[in-house]
Image (cartoon, rainbow, N blue to C red):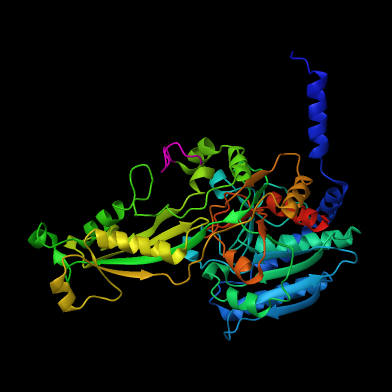
Amino acid sequence: MNKITPLVLLSLLTCSLVWAQSPEVLAIRKHRNQQADQLIREYTTFLSLPNVATDSVNIRKNAAFIMDMMQKRGIGNVQLLEANKAGAPPAVYGEVKVPGATQTLIFYAHYDGQPVNPAQWAQGLSPFQPKLYTAALDRNGTALPFPADGKYQDDWRIYGRSASDDKAGVFAILSAYEALTKSGLQPGSNLKFFFEGEEEAGSPHLDQILEKHKALLQSDLWIICDGPVHQSGKKQLVFGVRGDAHLDLTVYGPKRPLHSGHYGNWAPNPALLLSKLLASMKDDNGRVLVRGFYDDVTPLSTSEKKAMQEVPSVEEQMKKELGINAVEMPGALLSEAISQPSLNINGMQSGNVGKMASNQIPTFATAVIDLRLVLGNDWRRQQQKVVDHIKAQGYHVIDHDPTDAERAAHAKLIKVIPGNDGYNAQRTSMDLPIAQKVIKAVQTTTTDPLVLQPTSGGSLPLYLFQKYLGAKTITVPIANHDNNQHAENENIRLGNLFEGIETMGAVMLMK
């Protein structure tokens, strides 16, 4: 048996003290355990409200439900913050002023969700009829009724649209404040709450809301509750997000579908042309070959590089979980790969497949390209780099379906429609004093060391907060990493939801 030396024992005791869960966190936990049944019933009612941003009637019902939750919890100045455009989804706002507080935190989450296709959900599931399961579906989870005794297990999951992205954030924030007040605890900061209603639609009116209500939305820090914890299961703080931009591409072939026997080897096939074009954009090691794609990247700071080195490796875990044998960028860890700009093919279409397949040369082939940006990239400039690459491959670029004259004049025709709803990346220094306070606060909720990520793989329009408010942001995610966000069978692990309440409460308590 190995002996524990006095020095090692002292080190272990020190770590346990530093990472011990605070009495305040334990009080929050006691409250949420006692109120679990009431919390889950309120949450499932919230999830039953359809929340696609374009569904204005139901979006307003969601906003009204949130306002009611806030008022029941004693939050003041509850109101809708409207954009300039009539009918645009509103943000829901409220505030709590704390006597003697010297700093102000704004808690952000969004209440809209991705569009749904009910036919794609597993048998027995419906996007807006939340159901409880014993575990994840791919781990043989089975449906069960919501327990009459109000006792829930951490590994149980609720399935429903926005169960994790991002009604979990809205609910955890509001439930955390309720837990504080019901436990006799006072926040250490003035609190403001801002819940957006069209993040999944690209936040097209967020800039209007921020500019219109600039005075009301001043703060020392925005706490963004969105996204998953680390794949290892450990809690993480994320200090930046990637930007996002899209391009729609359509390559044209013959004006009508052609018999592949009569015209194969003669008429150009747009599916093949598009495949070759897309293949020209990346090499076999995952590096984007578009000229200048990486030129304007802002390097990580010394502390950010150090944090990256300490991110736990999950490569083998995720390859096994996802059923893949290799990664796109050999030798790069997941945390390293997502800190770089990326070019992803969201989808392709040309002709028919499966039972509908026919021996033909199709008339067109189309694809959607997703560009993820890091600090230093400008989203419009990044789009233009891709367009320039396409031109360099011999294509004549147009923004409309081709005319007969254009078809006659050019061998390679492509319609390129750059998305106009892109946004840039944002990053907050983890060396800021208030950032260090957040790190310490969240650490009081867990005995495991936190994972500190300079940049998230996902995208949020956080640069708008910096642009219009001069604000700093830190993302404090709570959802399980395998939550199926943006896809069918979205879910939240109950342990993550409950622990998220503790995490938000700990941040509210910090001074």
Please say if 396 is above or below 2: below
Q: Is residue 448 left or right of residue 87?
A: right
Residue visible at 57% across and 84% down in the picture: 85
Residue at the bottom extreme of this rendering = 86
**Residue 59 is inside the magenta segment:** no
Q: Is residue 196 above or below residue 36?
A: below
**Horizontal relation, residue 232 to residue 436: left or right:** left
State the image coordinates of residue 263 (x, y, percent, origin top left). Answer: 9, 62
Magenta range is 324-333
Residue at 68%, 78% in the rendered image: 213
Q: What residue do we see at 10% from left, 56% from top?
A: 265
Camera sees residue 37? yes
Please say whether residue 149 is visible from this viewpoint: no
- As rendered, which of 419 and 385 lies closer to the eye? 385
Query: Which picture quadrant has residue 460?
Result: bottom right
Image location of residue 257, percent across then percent down: 17, 68
Specify the principal SS of the magenta part.
loop
Observer-nearest of 486 and 10: 10
Which residue is depicted at the point 29% across and 51% down?
Answer: 279
| Residue 347 picture location, percent across and down | 37, 59
Residue situated furthest top in the rendering: 1
Residue 390 versus residue 467: which sits nearer the camera? 467
Q: Nearer the viewer, residue 27 or 285?
A: 285
Position of the C terminus, as image quadrant, is: bottom right
Q: Where's the N terminus, which quadrant?
A: top right
The image shows residue 454 at horizontal and vertical percentages of: 60, 49
